[in-house]
Image (cartoon, coloured by chain):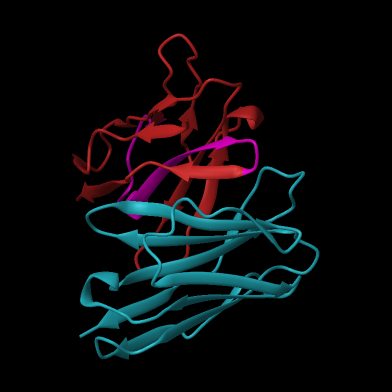
Chain colours: A cyan, B red
Amino acid sequence: DAGVIQSPRHEVTEMGQEVTLRCKPISGHNSLFWYRQTMMRGLELLIYFNNNVPIDDSGMPEDRFSAKMPNASFSTLKIQPSEPRDSAVYFCASSLSSGNTIYFGEGSWLTVV
Amino acid sequence: AQRVTQPEKLLSVFKGAPVELKCNYSYSGSPELFWYVQYSRQRLQLLLRHISRESIKGFTADLNKGETSFHLKKPFAQEEDSAMYYCALKGAQKLVFGQGTRLTINP
């Protein structure tokens, strides 16, 4: 298995534009997590899904952020409109809900100018 | 509520010296604790978990429920240990991380 796959790896966008980050979890994993990493705040859990259903979105910073998981092999994190303070590395991770090891993707490096 | 605290954002030690990265947690249930490592510009990867009681790359961590701690230790640091280290707590299905400690090993 190629592991958790994220795209794009790097994105630079202008303030106000819509940003869509994509994630393909490891095949067979039924839990999916979106994290944001910044120097100031470290790793923050934004939202996680279990069997494609959002379970906890309390970490989503505001209404500009939304996440979907239309099927077991794909999830998106959308920011609309984007702001410079959204600049961060966004990690997707997946696991078996019965397991205790979470596997991370390589991250999407977002810069909003 | 789950909370993980890593009090040191930065830690610098000399090669061959002992290393201890501190982690304290807060959780009302029975915790599962982990250490993840992130080498420069790479993805996070699991280093070790408390239930395995294993030693990985010379690192060990013992869960102390009385002190609610899960400190990461290595007796002799190596230059390749320089990385970002995150302590994490799993309650139910959610994995919550501390803010991380950037470890630098000086030659």
Q: Measured from the top left, where is residue A18 in percent x and y? A: 39, 87
Q: Nearer the viewer, residue A93 or A60?
A: A60
- Quadrant placement of the C terminus of chain A: bottom left
Residue A17, by quadrant, is bottom left
Q: Measured from the top left, where is residue B85 in percent x and y? A: 37, 47
- Image: A67 above or below A33: below
Point 45% across, 8% down: residue: B66
Point 41% across, 33% down: residue: B3
Tell me: A105 left or right of A36: right
Q: Measured from the top left, where is residue A90 in percent x and y? A: 42, 69
Point 28% across, 87% down: residue: A16
Single out the residue that lies furthest toward the top: B66
Q: Is residue B38 magenta?
A: no
Q: Measured from the top left, where is residue A107 in percent x and y? A: 46, 72
- Quadrant placement of the N terminus of chain A: bottom right
Single out the residue that lies furthest toward the front: A63
Q: Would you say residue A28 is visible in this rendering? A: yes
Q: Would you say residue B42 is visible in this rendering? A: no
- Image: A34 above or below A83: above
Residue interval drawn in magenta: B73-93
Q: Is residue B83 magenta?
A: yes
Point 75% across, 60% down: residue: A29
Q: Nearer the viewer, residue A70 or B102?
A: A70
Tell me: B1 left or right of A76: left
Single out the residue that lies furthest toward the right: A28
- Image: B48 above or below A55: above
- Image: B74 above or below A91: above
Counting every numbered tag in the picture gives 0
